[in-house]
Amino acid sequence: MPRAKKITLGVTGSIAAYKAAEIASALTSAGHEVRVIMTEHATRFISPITFETLTRQKVLVDMFSDEDHRQVSHIEQGTNIDLVLVAPATFNIIGKAVQGIADDLLSSVLAAADPKRVLYAPAMNVNMFENPAFQANMATLKDRGSQFVEPEEGMLACGVYAKGRLAKVPAILDAVESFLAPKPLQGKRVLITAGATREYIDPIRFLSNSSSGQMGVALARACRSYGAEVTLLLANSTLDAPGVDVIRVDTVADLYAAALKVFPETDYLFAAAAVSDFKPAARSDSKIKKTGASLNIELVPNTDVLFELSQMKTHQKLIGFAAESEAMLANAKGKLERKKLDWIIANSLDNFARTSGKVWLVDAQEIEELPELPKPELAYAILDALLAKGL
Ligand SMILES: Cc1cc2nc3c(=O)[nH]c(=O)nc-3n(C[C@H](O)[C@H](O)[C@H](O)COP(=O)(O)O)c2cc1C
């Protein structure tokens, strides 16, 4: 996980200003030092007291009312920090940043800050968002190296359903984490499979398992924030991974076909999907009717995707997952050798569909036990351990 950083959180006069409280709280809980700077207009929407309580830091609003001028706030908060996050960012503050107007504390901070250290999460009415002036301003700031978490479609405060709503708080936090993380995987292409495949008996009935896809999605997000270009083949999960190329798949055949296209260009493959080892010998085109008699379904072995890919291995490093109900480590070692894997991440079936997990990292030489962690943190712990082993 990225280490504790100094973050300036700029809050401007949008109806979404109250959502910045959740952002301030989450960033503070993650151990970051968060200093909130509000525009005068933002204080009409939410009180500085809220942010002072959540961040345990004095909130700055007025450039001239600070009692202590031994440090010049706008220079200090704009330059001596790891990130300036403006969330929500109004039409107005973005216009001022582009034009170089510094008529209050936050705009002065932005004037002093390196544009490459600024992340904006705009929120506004759809007409304001689509206004050519705003679109041009956003493009200019991107050209200068600033990043954006663009607003999403939703019910706007003005009562219309359109684009302009502040991005969801988890997406903003994800962008912050990604911004702050080191980039040891820069230039690497990562392919990750996740979720539970289905094998159909008839058009609506299928064999599957309870994998939620959380571990693979967490790995995809972590690889992305470490700088990799990530493709995620996600089977039957509604989870999302911003900034990741997510290809949604259903059956093992779908997953295999998609993997074959991406694998040659892949540097690291993480095979976290819980694939069906068996499939029905035949799939009925129509719904199987109840007859009163019992029904036998013949199952045949399915394509072993990881084994097949391991046969095509050139420069790729392969990391498999082994979920076992017994003899976990012995079975994991067997799979490691059979499928020519570089590492295997062994875990017990208890990890399925849970938000946290415990794993062992197995390679030909050793077994490393990682602590039980929430899956988003476990993903970083796995990557850090693999990087230390020469990934
Ligand atoms: C109820 C209300 C909601 C507003 N919501 C937004 C908004 O979501 N986005 C925006 O760009 N401006 C919004 N405005 C307009 C800004 O508050 C206005 O442009 C102001 O000058 C912004 O100042 P600031 O950027 O210094 O905070 C809203 C105004 C009101 C009265």
Image (tube, rainbow, N blue to C red):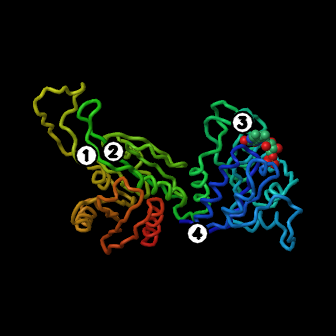
Q: Quadrant of residue 237?
A: top left
Disc 3 target residue: 125
Mark 3 neighbour class, 10 Å CA radius: few under 14, some 14 to 19, many 20 or more: many
Q: Earlier in the sequence, mark 3 or mark 2?
A: 3
- State the CA–CA distance, disc 3 to disc 4: 36 Å
- State the CA–CA distance, disc 2 to disc 4: 37 Å
Q: Is mark 3 within 8 Å of ligand 1?
A: yes
Disc 3 vs disc 2: which is toward the camera? 3
Q: Secondary structure at mark 1?
A: loop
- State the CA–CA distance, disc 3 to disc 1: 50 Å
Q: Earlier in the sequence, mark 2 or mark 1?
A: 2
Point out which mark residue 303 bears: 1
Q: Earlier in the sequence, mark 3 or mark 1?
A: 3
Q: Secondary structure at mark 2?
A: helix
Q: Secondary structure at mark 3?
A: loop
Q: Report the image quarter containing ligand 1.
A: top right
Q: Amino acid at mark 4?
A: Arg
Disc 4 target residue: 3
In this view of the protein, which residue sits in the foreground, 351 or 189?
Answer: 351
